[in-house]
Image (cartoon, rainbow, N blue to C red):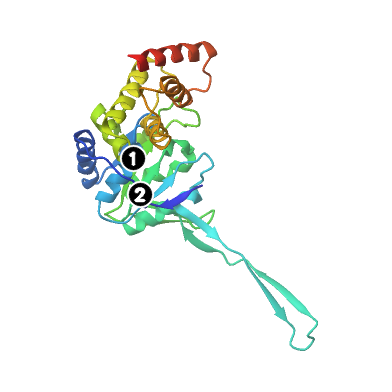
């Protein structure tokens, strides 16, 4: 399990497309509802969630969904064993070993956020099993956290009124994704995200690289055309555009003079980002032909 405090230093693009989504998300969060950004990999769900969490103007943190998650990973648990060595006062060669099983409760990130009124981003929450996520039902519905003291007893912790949570998830057909419970989905507002408009993609590439606008525009156009024209198994993301732009810039590749090399770079990067590992050789051949046609047009 990976848990991190958020340090938002990476450049973030604010276009009308982003502002419209952020405005709706802030409306829902300010009203007290959980929000859920759902969409394909590479559509900016996590970056957008972090951007919105920062705008909430209060502490925020992030947890990453994992199929090995258990209840204790989210709300915490009892941990700790102490070992004490005692020297006999009368016989100095005698050492007594004493092990004390004094366990101490340590809050998980979810419980901590619920107590303090922080904003929590639960990134790719559907990578966690439903049993682990069941704890969220009482939090979102009744505003309480069920904290087990032992096998027989449970205490209830009231959720701070300022607590907010932002979920993100990939489509269910992706590998390693579990179906979210209907009861949980009904307690959040889902905003479906797709790849942004061309202006937003261009601004993201320009802000994350040092290429000129003409080169960035060409790269974005090729990637978008390939994404819209190719098989559903090939959905290159904005990351691909940034990678290509950085390679072109750092290696001083001239688009007009190094056409053959340029095509190979596009092929290597765009075809390696297929959403399905079961891509046949025939499908790859067709994709290469399509990519060559796009780059020469």
According to the picture, the residue beneath numbered tag 2 turns out to be 120
Is residue 258 in view from this perspective?
yes
Number of the front mark, 1 or 2: 1
Q: Which numbered disc, 1 or 2, marks the residue that appears first in the sequence?
A: 2
Dot 2: few (<14), some (14–19), or many (≥20) neighbours within 10 Å? many
Give the total number of marks visible in the rendering. 2
For the point 34% across and 21% down, which residue is it?
222
Around disc 1, counting alpha carbons within 10 Å, would you say few (fewer than 14), some (14 to 19), or many (20 or more)?
Answer: some
What residue is rendered at 34% in x and 26% in y? Answer: 219
Q: Nearer the viewer, residue 157 or 125?
A: 125
- Residue 31, compared with residue 173, is above or below; it is below
Which of the 4 image quarters holds residue 244? top left
Residue at (39% x, 48% y) in the render: 62
Q: Position of residue 180 (x, y in %)?
A: 41, 33
Of residues 162 and 197, the one drawn nearer to the viewer in this rendering: 197
Q: Nearer the viewer, residue 197 or 184?
A: 197
Please determine whether, in this image, residue 168 is positioned above or below residue 281.
Answer: below
- Residue located beneath label 1 in the image: 208
Q: Position of residue 289 (x, y in %)?
A: 44, 12
| Coordinates of residue 138 in the picture (x, y in percent) | 37, 46
**Image quarter (top left, top right, bottom left or bottom right) of the C terminus:** top left
Q: Which mark is residue 73?
A: none
Q: In the visual, does 246 lie left or right of 17?
A: right
Q: Secondary structure at mark 1?
A: helix
Residue 165: horizontal and vertical position, in percent?
33, 46
For image coordinates 42% across by 33% down, the residue present is 247
2 in relation to 171, above or below = below
Residue 5 lies in quadrant: bottom left
Q: Residue furthest front?
A: 257
Q: Do callouts 1 and 2 mark residues in contact (Cβ within 8 Å)?
A: no
């Amino acid at each position: 399990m990976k848990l991190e405090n958020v340090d938002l230093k990476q450049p973030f693009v604010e276009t009308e497309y982003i502002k419209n989504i952020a405005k709706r998300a802030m409306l829902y969060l300010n009203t007290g509802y959980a929000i859920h950004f759902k969409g394909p990999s590479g559509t900016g769900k996590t970056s957008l969630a972090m951007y919105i969490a920062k705008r909430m103007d209060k502490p925020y943190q992030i947890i990453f969904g994992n199929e090995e998650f258990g209840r204790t990973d989210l709300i915490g648990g009892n941990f700790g064993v102490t070992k004490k060595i005692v020297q006999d006062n009368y016989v100095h060669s005698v050492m007594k070993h004493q092990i004390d099983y004094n366990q101490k409760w340590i809050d998980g990130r979810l419980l901590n956020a619920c107590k303090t009124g922080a904003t929590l981003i639960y990134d790719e929450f559907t990578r966690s099993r439903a049993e682990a996520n069941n704890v969220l039902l009482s939090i979102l519905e009744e505003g309480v956290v069920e904290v087990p003291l032992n096998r027989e007893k449970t205490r209830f912790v009231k959720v701070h009124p300022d607590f907010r949570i932002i979920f993100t998830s990939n489509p269910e057909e992706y590998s390693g994704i579990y179906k979210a419970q209907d009861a949980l989905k009904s307690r959040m507002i889902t905003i479906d995200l797709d790849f942004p408009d061309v202006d937003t993609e261009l601004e993201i590439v320009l802000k994350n690289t040092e290429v000129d606008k003409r080169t960035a525009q060409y790269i974005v156009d090729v990637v978008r055309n390939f994404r819209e024209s190719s098989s559903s198994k090939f959905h290159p993301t904005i990351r691909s555009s940034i990678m290509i732009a950085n390679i072109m810039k750092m290696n001083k590749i001239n688009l007009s003079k190094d056409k053959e090399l340029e095509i190979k770079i596009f092929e290597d990067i765009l075809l390696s980002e297929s959403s399905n590992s079961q891509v046949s050789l025939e499908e790859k051949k067709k994709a290469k032909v399509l990519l060559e046609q796009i780059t020469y047009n």
